[in-house]
Image: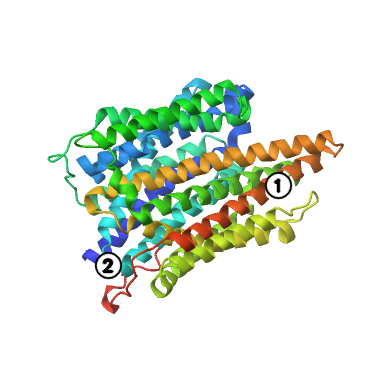
Amino acid sequence: MNDRRTRWLALYALCLGDLMIVLDTNIVNVALPSIQTDLGFSPEALAWVVNAYMLTFGGFLLLSGRLGDLYGNRRVLLGGVASFTAASVACAFAPSATFLVVGRAVQGLGGAAVSAVALALIMGLFTDPGERAKAMGVFGFVMSGGGAVGVLLGGVLTGLLTWHWIFLVNVPIGFAVWLLVTRLIPADAGQADGSRLDVTGAALVTVALMLAVYGVVGGNEAGWTSTRTLGILAGAVALLVAFVVREARVEHPLVPLRLFTLRNVAVSQVVGVLWAGAMFACFFLTALYMQGVLGYDALEVGLAYLPSCLVMAVMSVSVSDRLVMRFGIRPPLTVGLALVAASLALFAGVPVDGRYALHVLPGMVLLGLGAGIAFNPVLLAAMGDVEPHEAGLASGVVNTSFMMGGALGLAVLVSISSWRTSDLAAGGSAPLEALNGGYQLAFATGAVMAAAAAVVGGTLLRPKPMQAPEPDLEPALPAAA
């Protein structure tokens, strides 16, 4: 097998592994009512099926990325795939609510390891600008479209089979990824000989991120101004400050602070936070609108996302890289994020008696177009200035910003939706009208966030110019994505 073909097969293996992780962020949402009935979750405890995964996933991204740099990205990825697959089996056959929550936490640990280093491995495989742009397009669809695919697959599996299959589907994928990665990607030794792990720094940032996620995901339930929420978030900030102080002084920092002095890295994190907040909320709120207002069942909700997934796949794999190579990074990023903002603006006008073809489908198509175009340049901008020996850490930073932005954006927009619904209900609106009014305001706020991401990226990024690839460097399998 020639090197070019091997690289692209390795890319597909890495994307499959990361897709497995991204799916699990959203695939569970549609199945929550069935899980609650079977395992006897209380309404309050049910949220931990999602929160347990988010806590460990968000908390261990930075540490996993640094471990990849020190001890080998391939080794960390294989460990993550193995633990995620084993935890998926445990979740599928969980005999109790507690067992399922623990399994979800272990899934989050494995997911953090895979997500934190997959991007670094891809950047190492593809050094030519043209091939890298194509590879980032494929990987961009996995990260941006995985949420929509998760809702689609969750609805189909839960509607046609049982909720157990949303976890069992990971088992053959995990085995396939393990076998392909071991065969296609050479072992990398990492930099462990020249550095050592900053254990104290790792503990500080991991606990800080877990506290931040916990405070954000519980903010709506406990109240954003409650002593509990403010105390948790203050603790997270204090630990982050302590972490930054330590990293500035220690000889071998977990996260070298010079990484954040790179303009494109810093700006990309801001763009990622804003965009992820809008995207996460869009997937979540559109599902709630279709179920709670339009009365769709789980299968219908899943199928409603199919056009968005298809459009996003075509744009990510076949169009985005060509736009980047012709116009550079900033124009496609700005246009793509503007289309996402337009999609959310359309959803902000959905009525109580909305019809799919008229009120849902146009927004889904625009979302697919925008996300499919924009994710590739965001990844290229974030990773383009990073030295190879810190690619794992930079990959972890990118994933952390998206994860934290998604969690924060979702929490804020759900809080805005709930406040508006309560306000309308108190004013005498019918329950369904009040619920829909809350969703409309949340969608409008998400549109503002996506528009802000477009402005920040379009005005502040200063990426290196892209160069067109030579004809003989075209990938051997461009259509296989």
Alpha-carbon span between mark 1 and mark 2: 44 Å
- The residue that appears at 26% across and 77% down in the rendered structure is 472
| Left or right of 88, for residue 41 | right
Residue closest to the eye, 353 or 465: 465
Residue 341: horizontal and vertical position, in percent?
A: 60, 58
Q: Quadrant of residue 133?
A: bottom left
Residue 189: horizontal and vertical position, in percent?
A: 16, 45
Residue 198: horizontal and vertical position, in percent?
A: 24, 32
Q: In this view, does 229 lie above or below 414?
A: above
- The residue that mark 2 highlights is 128
Amino acid under disc 2: Asp
Q: How would you rate the neighbour count of disc 1 (Cα within 10 Å): few for under 14, some for 14-19, many for 20 or more? A: many
Does any portion of residue 170 appear in the rendered image? yes
**Sequence-earlier tag: 1 or 2:** 2
| Left or right of 455, for residue 386 | left
**Which part of the image, by quadrant, shows the N terminus?**
bottom left
Does any portion of residue 313 appear in the rendered image? no
Amino acid under disc 1: Leu
Looking at the rendered structure, the secondary structure element under dot 1 is helix
Residue furthest toward the left?
A: 193
**Which part of the image, by quadrant, shows the C terminus?**
bottom left
Q: How would you rate the neighbour count of disc 2 (Cα within 10 Å): few for under 14, some for 14-19, many for 20 or more? A: some
- The residue that appears at 63% across and 27% down in the rendered structure is 223
Looking at the rendered structure, the secondary structure element under dot 2 is loop
- The image's mark for residue 441 is 1
